Image: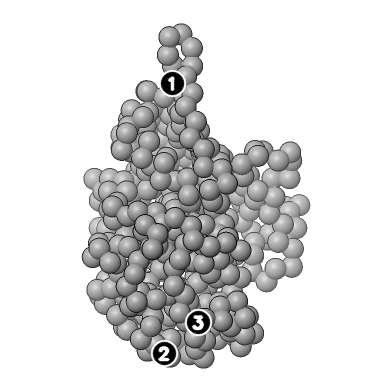
Amino acid sequence: MPDGVTSTPALGIGQVGLGAVSASHRAGYRRYGQPLVAGFDPSPEARERFAREAPQAAVHESLDALLDDPAVGVVDVAAPHLRDIRLPVVRAIAAAGKPMLIQKPLASTFDEAVELADVIAAANVIAMVNQNMCFTPGTRPLVDAVMRDRALGEPAFAQITVQYQFDPGDHPWFGKDARWWTGALTVHHLAFTHLLFGPPDSVYAVTGRDTGQPGVTLDGFGHLLLRYRSGMSVAVTSTGTYFGTQPAPHGNEVVWIQGPEGIADWRPDGPLVISRRAGGGIERAKTSWEGAGEWFPDAFGLTMAHLRQALEAGEVPLCSVADNLYVMAVVEAAYRSSAQNRVVRIEEIMGSRWDPSYGTGWSHGYRGWVPPASVGPRG
């Protein structure tokens, strides 16, 4: 069995919510040997599609039936993050005592995220948010370089540039939500910065839309400046309205982290380059994993592998629901900042839950996990 693949039969995966994104989950599970054993969706059409794609798995016609299935040891929640849909699903899973992986974003608002977190905490179950940018194949080398090896020294500035041409047209809900871009898309990058740097002290943001963008009615870009107690700053430039020249050969996300000892340039699907001043010139070291995996679908399989390993080890996973409240607070602060044209402190959003000494997301989860080798096709 490949390193990092869990062997406990009780940790079979049951999928709840069998819409479009769930197919990427399944492709990732196949690639990394994660055992999918069951699925449920209220839509008969979705259940039929699941049965064709996962013939080895049981198809259940109710959530209760899936939770009663003894083969299901962990639940993959891909139901929409609308409160009226997700809250009863999470309540039922928590009442059944099942650990769960919840598709990002955790909720539409910070208050709704707290509601979910309190349900989960009261049931004393383990729950992780599927912030899968934190588990792309290339993330671990970046985390090791920046956090373990301190290759840059103490980071002083980071910049994340996200440029997509995102025109969903007549899609029933893509681009239609008042908190679509920052809340559902840039939340990937905010969780990633939280993993590396922890929660900021404050946020200033500008959010909005390109009035000429087809299919997006309210929220199509979000540009944020995050400031930290240490003096560090992170600038996030994120837009779905971009339709100029394609920005990079390695995807639409570019991450740049600067410290006194050097600069890291990184892309989720591309290389990591560490640059340093040396002898009057610049030395560059490149770590490449191109061809070894991609964000879709690899990160879905690696995220579930991390959760299942953490459960076997009796550890809290990275990106836990409690940890993700800090990410949701940044999202909330961004929308408030944009609406009121002012800097918003995270303490203002979190109240008594705010811990200014919280530290990095990396320091609040299972760091001993071993990313498994791939065992199957990506498709």
- Counting residues from the start of the chain, the first of labels 1 and 2 encountered is 2
In three-dimensional space, the C-alpha distance between marks 1 and 3, rounded to whole angstroms, equals 51 Å
Numbered disc in front, either 1 or 2: 1
Q: Which residue is mark 2?
A: 64
The residue drawn where x is 24% and y is 45% is: 357
Q: Quadrant of residue 202?
A: top left
- Counting residues from the start of the chain, the first of labels 3 and 2 encountered is 3
- Counting residues from the start of the chain, the first of labels 1 and 3 encountered is 3
Q: Which residue is mark 3?
A: 57
Residue type at numbered disc 3: Ala
Residue type at numbered disc 1: Arg
Q: Quadrant of the N terminus?
A: bottom left
Q: Position of residue 296 (x, y in %)?
A: 57, 57
Would residue 185 be found to the left or right of residue 320 on screen? right
Q: Which secondary structure, mark 3?
A: loop
Q: Which residue is mark 1?
A: 276
Q: Position of residue 234 (x, y in %)?
A: 44, 38
Q: Quadrant of residue 92?
A: bottom left
Q: Dot 3 surroundings within 10 Å: few (below 14), some, or many (20 or more)? A: some
Q: Which mark is residue 306?
A: none
Q: Nearer the viewer, residue 41 or 289?
A: 289
Residue type at numbered disc 2: Asp
Would you place residue 159 above or below residue 22 in this image? above
Numbered disc in front, either 3 or 2: 3
Whether residue 182 appears in this view of the structure is no
Numbered disc in front, either 1 or 3: 3
The reply to whether discs 1 and 2 touch (Cβ–Cβ < 8 Å) is no
Q: Dot 1 surroundings within 10 Å: few (below 14), some, or many (20 or more)? A: some
The residue drawn where x is 55% and y is 51% is: 294
The residue drawn where x is 36% and y is 59% is: 4
In three-dimensional space, the C-alpha distance between marks 3 and 2, rounded to whole angstroms, equals 16 Å
Would residue 123 be found to the left or right of residue 173 on screen? left
